[in-house]
Image: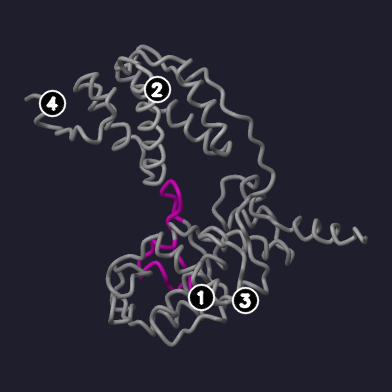
């Protein structure tokens, strides 16, 4: 049976150079994103990089994907360094390296033109994610009106990210049954990046927030349903639809503005806020890494903002 009958390929999703290389190249290209990359965020980022690069190659007259050379990749990457931050450029180069390696293994290309191209140097010693002072985090949580399902949900979601160091993706991926009792203590079960499962006991504040949310919104009778859900328009009640990450971000910005917090927060800010607060109160980096489900303490150090306080104190010594 012809491959075209087994795998229908919509031409509009294929870059011109890939479509021109034939059905085998087209199938292999789509397989890279469908079968080789499991994380949806990575899949979107890599596809966008590949699409933009191959469109650029078409614009400068490269006749076929098999004719892409290291010079083409290095020229495109060099141009990107003038428009994007180093991490973004390195991500684009990584996307091309992995894609072309996949195509080489599938005998679509003779060699990997991105293999020898070097990206911009980038050394990270401290993360860039905005964090909250513990007093600000407390004020934000206390400012939420919990007389509505939306308020109960939002306080529970923010509290979960602060007190369990959960990534927003892991938090939004939870079902009701992922909040459970063990040894007379409430626990949460998270599914982190790479499919890793991670369980954490709840801080007493988080325990209070989750219990109030589950009971106040009547979620305990739906153990397989999503824990964090959208609110129906006009009803003010929770639906059975999972809360999208973009909606969570909009909620956080809205809640921060209402609490008078000027810091430009993101979904990741609460993870960094919780880790920093834990370390300030005598916690160890090794245990923080375990709680955050980091493979290395080097990653956890990026969330440690205790040095920011030292820098601020020293700046105030400049008395003029």
Residues under labels 3 and 1: Cα distance?
23 Å
User: Image quarter for residue 69?
Assistant: top left
Local secondary structure at mark 4: helix
Q: Please give the residue where the numbered disc 4 appears in the rendered image.
A: 3
Residues under labels 3 and 4: Cα distance?
58 Å
- Residue in the picture at 58% in, 75% down: 140
**Magenta residue span:** 171-197
Ranked by sequence position, the earlier of labels 3 and 1 is 3
Ranked by sequence position, the earlier of labels 2 and 3 is 2
Label 2 CA crowd tier, 10 Å (few <14, some 14–19, many 20+): many
Local secondary structure at mark 2: helix
The answer to whether 39 is drawn above or below residue 73 in the figure is below
Q: How many labels does the image show?
A: 4
Q: Position of residue 84 (x, y in %)?
A: 54, 38
Disc 2 to disc 1: CB gap under 8 Å: no
Label 4 CA crowd tier, 10 Å (few <14, some 14–19, many 20+): few
Q: Please give the residue where the numbered disc 2 appears in the rendered image.
A: 101
Q: Please give the residue where the numbered disc 3 appears in the rendered image.
A: 138
The answer to whether 42 is drawn above or below residue 18 in the figure is below
- Residue in the picture at 47% in, 70% down: 157
Magenta span includes 195: yes
Q: Which of marks 2 and 1 is in front?
A: 2
Q: Nearer the viewer, mark 4 or mark 1?
A: 4
Ranked by sequence position, the earlier of labels 3 and 4 is 4
- Extreme-right residue of the structure: 320
| Circle on res. 185 | 1
Disc 4 to disc 1: CB gap under 8 Å: no
Q: Is residue 152 left or right of residue 289?
A: left
Ranked by sequence position, the earlier of labels 2 and 1 is 2
């Amino acid at each position: 049976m012809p491959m075209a009958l087994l795998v229908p390929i919509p031409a509009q999703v294929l870059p011109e150079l890939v479509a021109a290389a034939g059905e085998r190249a087209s199938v292999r290209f789509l397989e890279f994103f469908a079968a080789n990359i499991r994380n949806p965020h990575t899949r979107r980022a890599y596809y966008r990089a590949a699409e933009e690069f191959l469109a650029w190659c078409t614009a400068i007259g490269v006749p076929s994907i098999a004719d892409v050379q290291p010079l083409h990749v290095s020229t495109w990457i060099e141009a990107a360094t003038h428009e994007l931050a180093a991490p973004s450029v390195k991500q684009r180069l990584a996307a091309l390296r992995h894609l072309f390696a996949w195509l080489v293994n599938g005998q679509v290309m003779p060699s990997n033109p991105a293999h020898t191209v070097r990206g911009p140097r980038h050394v990270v010693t401290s993360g860039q994610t905005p964090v909250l002072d513990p007093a600000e985090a407390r004020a934000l949580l206390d400012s939420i009106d919990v007389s509505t399902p939306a308020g109960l949900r939002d306080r529970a979601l923010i509290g979960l990210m602060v007190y369990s160091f959960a990534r927003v993706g892991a938090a939004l991926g939870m079902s009701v049954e992922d909040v459970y009792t063990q040894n007379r203590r409430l626990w949460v079960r998270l599914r982190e990046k790479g499919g890793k499962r991670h369980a954490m006991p709840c801080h007493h504040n988080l325990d209070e927030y989750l219990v109030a949310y589950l009971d106040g919104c009547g979620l305990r009778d739906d153990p397989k349903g999503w824990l964090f859900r959208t609110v129906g328009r006009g009803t003010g009640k929770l639906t059975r639809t999972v809360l999208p990450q973009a909606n969570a971000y909009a909620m956080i910005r809205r809640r921060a503005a209402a609490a008078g917090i000027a810091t430009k927060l993101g979904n990741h800010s609460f993870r960094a806020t919780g880790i920093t607060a834990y370390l300030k109160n005598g916690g160890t980096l090794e245990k923080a890494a375990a709680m955050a489900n980091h493979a290395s303490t080097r990653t956890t150090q990026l969330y440690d903002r205790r040095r920011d306080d030292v820098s601020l104190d020293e700046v105030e010594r400049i008395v003029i």
